[in-house]
Image (spheres, rainbow, N blue to C red):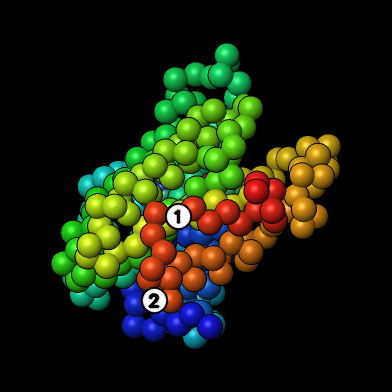
Amino acid sequence: MYRLDDQVALVTGASRGIGRAISLALAQAGAHVALLSRSAADLERVAEEISAGGGQAEVHVCDVTDADGVAAVVKEIIERHGALHILVNNAGTTRDNLVLRMSDEEWRVPLEINLKGAFNTIRASSRPMLKQRYGRIINITSVVGVTGNAGQANYAASKAGLIGLTKSIAKELASRNITVNAVGPGYIHTDMTAGITEQVKNKLLEAIPLGRLGEPDDVAPAVVFLASKAAGYITGQTLLVDGGMVM
Ligand code: NAP
């Protein structure tokens, strides 16, 4: 429904889970998708899936915490395609623990990847987007960035930070036709949530009006919509894709 033909997109954390689903959906909508993560083999598999479906993709092995590496990837995309229209900051990680027991390292890593990683890609992409007077930036936050979550103070702080980053950058870039929004998934079946016990899962289900955990394919269409020209009057918003969990 929302076509992205002739558009170039960069998706971080594209090797699996939600990022893989977003990449496939963007490609299916017609975008050329630059896939970024630290795992070459997984990215190649996603690129092959995209090609098999008639889409176009390329692979960039990079750690989002490496600001110079991220800048080099954006430069390469601009040199190769002449534009970068869509940036999806999806790379993320958790280091769950209670604050009482949380090490400095456990605090640092999710902030560095989830928040500073997004800053790195936004800083590198905003100049070309300003020049081309068009852009769509979508940051993948989380419901826990809105509600908080015991045992995830580090992760929730990074995701709440992403919402503040989204609103600030939305204000900075709006005059050049660049929109910046966040998508906040609820509990989605991926490697990240694979460790959830049956007991916790049953408790979660009681809190989800739609009565099921989400799938990566539930999140991807929200990103395609926000990446499309149809969403051109929406900026600085957080769209929760959570089965109604937070309302
Ligand atoms: P996942 O299956 O664990 O995938 C995480 C992705 O991030 C992988 O592609 C991983 O790629 C990439 N990544 C991690 N650290 C990276 C780094 N330093 N540099 C580059 N890429 C990195 O997780 P997911 O569930 O799909 O989560 C995707 C996003 O959705 C995350 O931001 C997460 O916080 C958010 N989210 C997930 C849920 C959920 O229930 N699953 C809920 C709310 C929000 P490599 O390992 O190949 O580098």
Q: Residue 114, percent across and down?
A: 43, 42
In the displayed structure image, the side of residue 64 where residue 47 appears, left or right: right
Q: Secondary structure at mark 2?
A: helix
- Inspect the image, locate mark 1, and give the three-letter code of the amino acid beneath it: Gln
Residue 216: give its label: none
Residue 67, picture quadrant: top left
Other residues around mark 1 within 10 Å, as few (<14) / some (14–19) / many (≥20) = some
Q: Residue 138, percent across and down?
A: 42, 58
**Disc 2, ligand 1: is the CB inside 8 Å?**
no
Residue 237: give its label: 1
In the displayed structure image, the side of residue 235 where residue 246 appears, left or right: right
> How many labels were placed on the picture?
2
Name the residue at the top extreme.
Answer: 100
Q: Is residue 57 visible?
A: no
- Inspect the image, locate mark 2, and give the three-letter code of the amino acid beneath it: Lys
Q: Nearer the viewer, residue 237 or 19?
A: 237
* Image vertical order of residue 184 relative to residue 83, above or below: above
Q: Nearer the viewer, residue 130 or 244?
A: 244
Q: Secondary structure at mark 1?
A: loop
* Image vertical order of residue 242 relative to residue 136, above or below: above
* Image vertical order of residue 25 relative to residue 237, above or below: below
CB within 8 Å, label 1 to label 2: no
Q: Which residue is mark 2?
A: 229
Q: Residue 77, percent across and down?
A: 26, 67
Residue 241, picture quadrant: bottom right
Q: Residue at x 77, y 44 (%)?
A: 207
Other residues around mark 2 within 10 Å, as few (<14) / some (14–19) / many (≥20) = some
Q: Earlier in the sequence, mark 1 or mark 2?
A: 2
Q: Residue 66, percent across and down?
A: 30, 44
Q: Residue at x 49, y 71 (%)?
A: 225
Q: Residue at x 37, y 48 (%)?
A: 167
Q: Is residue 142 visible?
A: yes
